[in-house]
Image: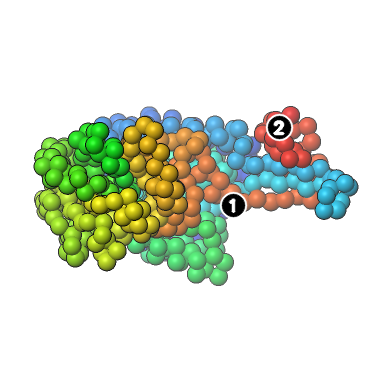
């Protein structure tokens, strides 16, 4: 375990590297990210078994997750090359401007400095050492200090070693990526005066504790916490009538995937009352047929899952369809309640059971469905099981208000890394409503600066006349690359 002093040493070193890295252009920084991706690929045979031994996740899943992590690094490297996240904007001086003469004003996003990054236990690659937050922070020109997760400690240190060595071989300044370990040290990291923002993926409890630390600093900093979510699924009456059994089969696969250890696991299903008999007849068997893998991530996570299941199970008017087994991995659990009883049983809508379990909420009418949907907290995802031409506008409207990503006739457990992705929603699913996945994630670790009446040579190259950096810019209100 590192001492508290090492937090300061790591941050100070990262801060020096951040300043040194300012000399590098975007193409050079992109090359650093690509070098890290290549190094991860080279060490795949070493990293995947280490991840398997610490996380109990199956090989195929971990191989896929590592591929995703490398893809993410390369996509964000390309994003750094393109420079669109700079949001370069030029307003030329205009004596005729409607509100009175306008000066020459040019705005660009700049990196913030040292970013503290915390990963989650359930994604030892994609949301960990050099996962989305670290890649986004580095792509934007920042330095990173990552707090190693106790659930995959050996993998964490090994990955960090590979990242640091790849950065060094590619010519990045020493210290651009640093690591620390320990909860107390993590808290010190969030408090450190040179840390300018934090990216966190993990539980609502852990995220909220650190968010409060970030907010209570003398100079509060943005804390991008991607936290837990119940991910409601709404089955419309028509969808149930047309393909009820298929929906149950899809749900059984999604709720048990990765032993239910996904922040996007569908944990709440709103089904018409008419579905109850079929659900009880078919779903327990479907759940029992799912392969769960070797075990949960840690014993602690299994204990938390079972205790969350027991606490929801004991809420008034909640009935047990199938109890979660206590072995590791636990067998899937299923609870149910009538929509009319939910208002007096809010824990059902507020308790994340991080594991293979869900609650079915039966609604007797459309009005009852809408009423209970209004009670939902913020969610990462909301899923609609519907039929073509049904257009359930009121449900879509409520889900849009509550969720960061809406899905139609799919399942929320896959999250692609792309330009339009949004992974984050209203609290408690996130502390700031932005995305931690995809190219838009870079913007979280940038801040805008405007330059008024500056000489060309003193401006960032992306704001200079003639567009020597060849980036998309908004010039006098119009987007152009000229
Ligand atoms: P976690 O227990 O909150 O841990 C995340 C990190 O925070 C770890 O480094 C942990 O340290 C640290 N931490 C936790 N509580 C702390 C506290 N009170 N003070 C200081 N540091 C603290 O979460 P997890 O078990 O890794 O992940 C599972 C959770 O993450 C689930 O709730 C899941 O829904 C959520 N998740 C969310 C997303 C998303 O994108 N929204 C993605 C994946 C997972 P230690 O190493 O000491 O434990």
Residue 112: give its label.
Answer: 1
Q: Residue at x 49, y 33 (%)?
A: 75
Q: Give whichever of 52, 419 is nearer the camera.
A: 419
| Callout 2–callout 1 Cβ contact below 8 Å | no
In the image, residue 410 lies at what x, y percent?
33, 36
Q: How many marks?
A: 2
The picture quadrant where one finds residue 383 is top left
Q: Quadrant of the C terminus?
A: top right
Residue picked out by circle 2: 480
How far separated are the C-alphas under marks 2 and 1? Answer: 26 Å
Local packing at callout 2 (Cα closer than 10 Å; few below 14, some 14-19, many 20+) is: few
Judge left or right: residue 273 versus residue 453. Answer: left
Q: Give whichever of 470, 250 is nearer the camera.
A: 250
In the image, residue 418 lies at what x, y percent?
47, 34
Q: Quadrant of the N terminus?
A: bottom left
Q: Give whichever of 324, 385 is nearer the camera.
A: 385
In the image, residue 339 lies at what x, y percent?
26, 56
Instruction: Identify the element where label 2 is drawn.
Output: strand
Judge left or right: residue 446 versus residue 408. Answer: right
* Sequence-first tag of 2 and 1: 1
Q: Ligand 1 lies in which image quarter?
A: bottom left
């Amino acid at each position: 375990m590192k001492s508290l002093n090492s937090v300061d040493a790591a941050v100070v070193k990262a801060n020096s590297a951040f300043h040194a890295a300012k000399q590098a252009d975007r193409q050079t920084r992109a090359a650093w990210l690509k070098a890290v991706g290549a190094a991860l690929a080279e060490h795949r045979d070493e990293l995947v078994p280490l991840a398997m031994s610490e996380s109990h996740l199956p090989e195929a899943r971990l191989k896929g997750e590592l591929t995703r992590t490398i893809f993410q690094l390369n996509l964000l490297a390309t994003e750094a090359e393109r420079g669109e996240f700079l949001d370069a904007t030029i307003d030329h001086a205009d004596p005729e401007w409607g509100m009175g003469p306008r000066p020459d004003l040019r705005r660009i996003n700049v990196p913030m400095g040292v970013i503290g990054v915390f990963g989650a236990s359930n994604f030892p690659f994609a949301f960990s050492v050099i996962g989305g937050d670290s890649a986004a922070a580095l792509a934007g020109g920042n330095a990173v200090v990552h707090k190693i997760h106790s659930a995959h400690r050996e993998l964490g240190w090994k990955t960090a070693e590979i990242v640091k060595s790849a950065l060094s071989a590619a010519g990045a300044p020493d210290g651009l990526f640093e690591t620390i370990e320990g909860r107390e040290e993590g808290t010190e990291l969030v408090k450190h005066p040179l840390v300018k923002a934090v990216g966190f993926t993990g539980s609502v409890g852990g995220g909220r504790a650190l968010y409060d630390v970030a907010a209570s600093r003398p100079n509060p900093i943005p804390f991008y916490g991607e936290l837990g979510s119940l991910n409601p699924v709404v089955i419309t009456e028509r969808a149930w009538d047309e393909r009820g059994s298929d929906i149950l089969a899809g749900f059984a696969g999604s709720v048990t995937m990765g032993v239910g250890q996904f922040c996007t696991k569908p944990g709440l299903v709103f089904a018409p009352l008419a579905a109850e008999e079929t659900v009880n007849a078919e779903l327990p068997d479907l759940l029992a047929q799912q392969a769960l893998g070797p075990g949960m991530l840690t014993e602690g996570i299994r204990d938390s899952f079972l205790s969350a299941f027991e606490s929801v199970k004991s809420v008034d008017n909640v009935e047990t369809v199938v109890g979660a087994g206590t072995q590791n991995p636990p067998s899937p659990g299923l609870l149910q309640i009538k929509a009319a009883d939910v208002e007096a049983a809010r824990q059902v809508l507020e308790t994340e059971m991080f594991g293979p379990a869900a609650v079915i909420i039966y609604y007797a009418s459309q009005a009852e469905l809408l009423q209970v949907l209004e009670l939902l907290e913020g969610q990462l995802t909301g899923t609609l099981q519907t039929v073509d031409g049904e257009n359930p506008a009121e449900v879509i409207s409520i889900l849009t208000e509550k969720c960061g990503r809406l899905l139609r006739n799919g399942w929320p457990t896959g999250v692609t890394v792309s330009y339009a992705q949004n992974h984050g929603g209203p609290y408690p699913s996130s502390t700031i409503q932005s995305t931690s996945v995809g190219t838009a994630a870079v913007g979280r670790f940038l801040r805008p600066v405007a330059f008024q009446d500056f000489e060309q040579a003193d401006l960032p190259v992306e704001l200079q006349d003639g567009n020597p950096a060849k980036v998309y810019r908004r010039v006098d209100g119009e987007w152009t690359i000229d």
